[in-house]
């Protein structure tokens, strides 16, 4: 079903939600279908593969009340759905879901790459493909290993207590992305905080406050990217590839910016 009124894409109309609403969703789903899919449960975080295996066996095409969408878990079904873009649309404007991709809510004119259908998806994916190819990643591995070694050494002396999540686990992905994009992230903690705030928009119990925090972080992240993008980059980086694509007219500057986001 296609929504005609774009104003209905609220995404954050969840003020009445909470633990009681969550439990009601899960209980109703279990009563109707014999099992429930709850990605917020501790058991899912501990062993997600066991949950997916149960879904594949008992309910391979499963409607989640909590996420307001269908969960498809068998490889053949997933492959078919991904390839049949004329039937299964990625465009969130074709969805009746209340919780949708936060990029659509934060920047409606430029949805994320994953929220586009061919031919736009194919065109934009082709621009970034080479930067994430196996060969490109292999060439980056020695530099990434060096970055990780330097990061470990900066944590302190043997025996010191450190906060591994904020000082290591959150920083390594940004260092890896620096190598891929050509960025020079000087304050990884701040950037990681922006990213985390935007990602929180995907939570099923997100609220209007979550939306405001996500929007603020989204704009801050965008300003940071604009500052970074103003430099010239080498051809072997993602930013260099995007700059060439903009110059050749393959993508617009707005599309290049959104690909980085």
Image: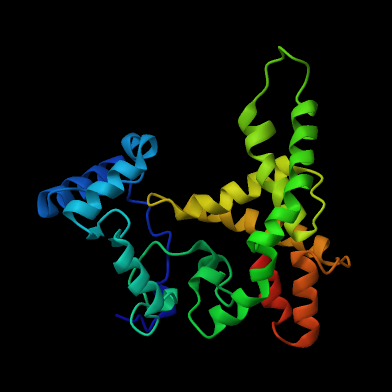
- Which residue is outermost to the top? 159
Q: Of 207 and 34, which appears nearest the observer? A: 34
Q: Is residue 248 above or below residue 82?
A: below
Q: Quadrant of residue 98?
A: bottom left
For residue 239, side relative to residue 170 (left or right): right
Q: Nearer the viewer, residue 143 or 97?
A: 143
Q: Is residue 168 left or right of residue 93?
A: right
Report x, y in % for residue 181: 75, 60
Task: Report whether 188 appears left or right of 46.
Answer: right
Residue under the image location 68 percent in, 21 percent down: 162
Residue 82 relative to residue 176: left or right: left
- The quadrant of the picture occupied by the C terminus is bottom right
Residue at 81% x, 60% y: name it: 228
Q: Residue at x 69, y 82 (%)?
A: 251
Q: x, y percentage for residue 28?
A: 15, 50
The one nearer the camera, 159 or 194, is 159
Note whether residue 261 is visible. Answer: no
Image quarter (top left, top right, bottom left or bottom right) of the N terminus: bottom left
Q: How many marks?
A: 0
Residue 229 x, y percent position in the rendering: 81, 66
Q: Is residue 240 above or below residue 16?
A: below
């Amino acid at each position: 079903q296609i929504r005609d009124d774009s104003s209905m894409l609220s995404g954050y109309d969840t003020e009445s939600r909470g633990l009681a609403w969550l439990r009601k969703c899960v209980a109703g789903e279990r009563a109707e279908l014999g099992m429930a899919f709850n990605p917020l449960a501790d058991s899912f975080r501990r062993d997600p593969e066991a949950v997916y295996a149960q879904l594949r066996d008992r309910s391979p095409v499963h409607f989640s009340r909590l996420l307001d969408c269908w969960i498809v878990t068998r490889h053949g079904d997933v492959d078919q759905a991904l390839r049949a873009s004329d039937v299964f649309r990625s465009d969130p404007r074709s969805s009746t879901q209340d919780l949708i991709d936060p990029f659509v809510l934060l920047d409606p004119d430029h949805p994320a790459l994953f929220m586009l259908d061919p031919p736009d998806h194919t065109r934009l994916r082709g621009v970034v493909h080479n930067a994430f190819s196996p060969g490109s990643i292999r060439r980056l591995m020695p530099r990434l290993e060096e970055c990780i070694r330097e990061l470990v050494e900066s944590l302190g002396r043997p025996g010191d207590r450190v906060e591994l999540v904020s000082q290591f686990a959150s920083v390594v992905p940004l260092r890896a992305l620096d190598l891929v994009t050509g960025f020079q992230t000087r304050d990884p903690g701040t950037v990681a905080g922006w990213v985390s705030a935007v990602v929180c928009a995907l939570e099923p119990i997100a609220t209007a406050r979550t939306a405001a925090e996500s929007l603020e972080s989204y704009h801050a992240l965008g300003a940071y990217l604009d500052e970074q993008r103003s430099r010239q980059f080498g051809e072997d980086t993602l930013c260099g590839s995007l700059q060439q694509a903009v110059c050749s007219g393959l993508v617009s500057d707005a599309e290049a910016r959104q690909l980085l986001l």
